[in-house]
Image (cartoon, rainbow, N blue to C red):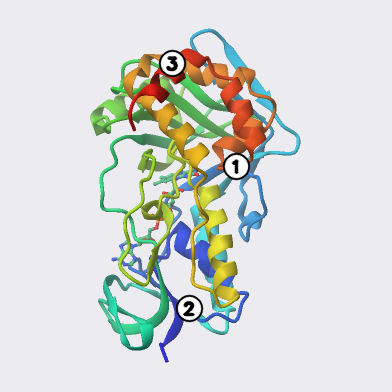
Amino acid sequence: MPDVDVAILGGGCAGLSVAARLARSRVSFRVVEPRERYSDDRAWSFWRTAPDPFEECVRASWSGWTVEGPRALVRRSSRCMLYQTVPAGAFYARAEDLIDDAPGGSIVRGTSATGVAPAAGGAVRVDTSDGSFTARHVLDGRPPARRPSYGQFFLGHEVATAEAIFDPCTVPLMHFRRGYSAGVDFLYILPFARDRALVEVTSFAPARPSREVFAAWLADEIAALGIRSHDVLREEAGALPMEVGYAETPAAGVTRIGLGGGAARPSTGYAFQRIQAQADALAAALASGCAPRLPAERPMTRFMDRVFLQVLATAPERGPALFESLFRNAPPERLERFLSGSTRAADRLSVMAALPPLPFLRAAARPA
Ligand SMILES: Cc1cc2nc3c(=O)[nH]c(=O)nc-3n(C[C@H](O)[C@H](O)[C@H](O)COP(=O)(O)OP(=O)(O)OC[C@H]3O[C@@H](n4cnc5c(N)ncnc54)[C@H](O)[C@@H]3O)c2cc1C
């Protein structure tokens, strides 16, 4: 008999999302995580489209957001689909509480997975820096090793300002800028209060702009807020894959999850909602005694992501106008659902209808 039903390599967003669900089942599991202790190292923002075990961790919710393109400022709002932020610190604490209460679940901190190999009876042996154990199934949530061909890159500071300058009801989601990367550049602000916000500079680009470029751009954006002084409370930076089919091939008996399992939406880099949907599917399969399987990607969604990325990659100067058109023309909530990972045909059709057809027809005609 294997030591546990499921080994989860990596107690990050994806690994803990599955563990939080398995904690309520009869499935035994062990999470292997190198960090000795967690810190509030990031915040996940997303349009809530479904419940998840972390709803009590939501720090802020917004019903309005803006996109500023070359022609105008587009305002969108929704009463039923809120844009929300979950801070990582609260997320990790909630997951640890759920795992602590799970009779067959545990998390081993300060330990790295070093390899997996087939074991007797169809099980898998997991080698770690602290010895080996066997599992019936392995979910590998370690960070991906492969550099994507296109990505979302960002640097942000959560600031407390001397003056009350932010509008806490509306998220400036994409306010486009020019000239910082070889791709599409924009400012993103999460206003937590009138005097507190995460201010982030972001590029959708083939390569990450240098730290110096990002730091100078961020400093300029904060200076442009017109404040006398501010304190930096937290910094976050990231590089997320935006590539269709970006998923690493796992070893036999292993399922790749999280970013390495292709969880980031190729056309946006958003991953939190898709990680939650993956966790629902994986935990349901495991709880019913089946092998874990990730939900299949719809061919039409892959095609749309591929065409959209091709337009961004080959004609980045069109990006701001395209996003502006999307947010101006797509019916309420359909675009936001699509960007969050919706596979509904009606959402896809609305998004297609909201875009100018010519650049997309050209991109679609190119070979994949
Ligand atoms: C700063 C930041 C902000 C983000 N904000 C958003 C957002 O607002 N909205 C959104 O949708 N997405 C966001 N993302 C993207 C995505 O949701 C996150 O990257 C998310 O954490 C990915 O989950 P993951 O489980 O794949 O990776 P991670 O959460 O990074 O987890 C990987 C885990 O593997 C562990 N690990 C590493 N090596 C080993 C090893 N040898 N053995 C075992 N474990 C190992 C790590 O310690 C870590 O815990 C953000 C990403 C970053 C970096």
- Marks 3, 1: nearer the viewer: 3
Residue pointed to by mark 1? 342
Relative to 328, does residue 3 appear above or below in the rendering?
A: below
- Horizontally, residue 113 falls left or right of residue 38, namely left
Residue located 37% across and 29% down the image: 204
The earlier-in-sequence mark between 3 and 1 is 1
Residue 52, percent across and down? 63, 57
Q: Nearer the viewer, residue 305 or 56?
A: 305
Per the image, label 1 sits on a secondary structure element best described as: loop
Which amino acid, by three-letter code, is at mark 1? Ser
**Residue 136 locus on image (x, y percent):** 42, 80
Q: Quadrant of the C terminus?
A: top left
- The tag on residue 359 is 3
Residue 334 visible here: yes
Name the amino acid, label 2: Phe
Q: Mark 2 and mark 3: span between their CA atoms?
A: 48 Å
Residue that appears at 61% across and 77% down: 25
Closer to the camera in the image, 228 or 233 = 233
Secondary structure under the numbered disc 3 in the rendered image: helix
Residue 165 visible in the picture = no
Q: Nearer the viewer, mark 1 or mark 2?
A: 1
Residue 29: which numbered mark, if any? 2
Q: Amino acid at mark 3?
A: Pro
- The reply to whether callout 3 and callout 1 are in contact (CB within 8 Å) is no
The answer to which image quadrant residue 138 occupies is bottom left
Secondary structure at badge 2 equals strand
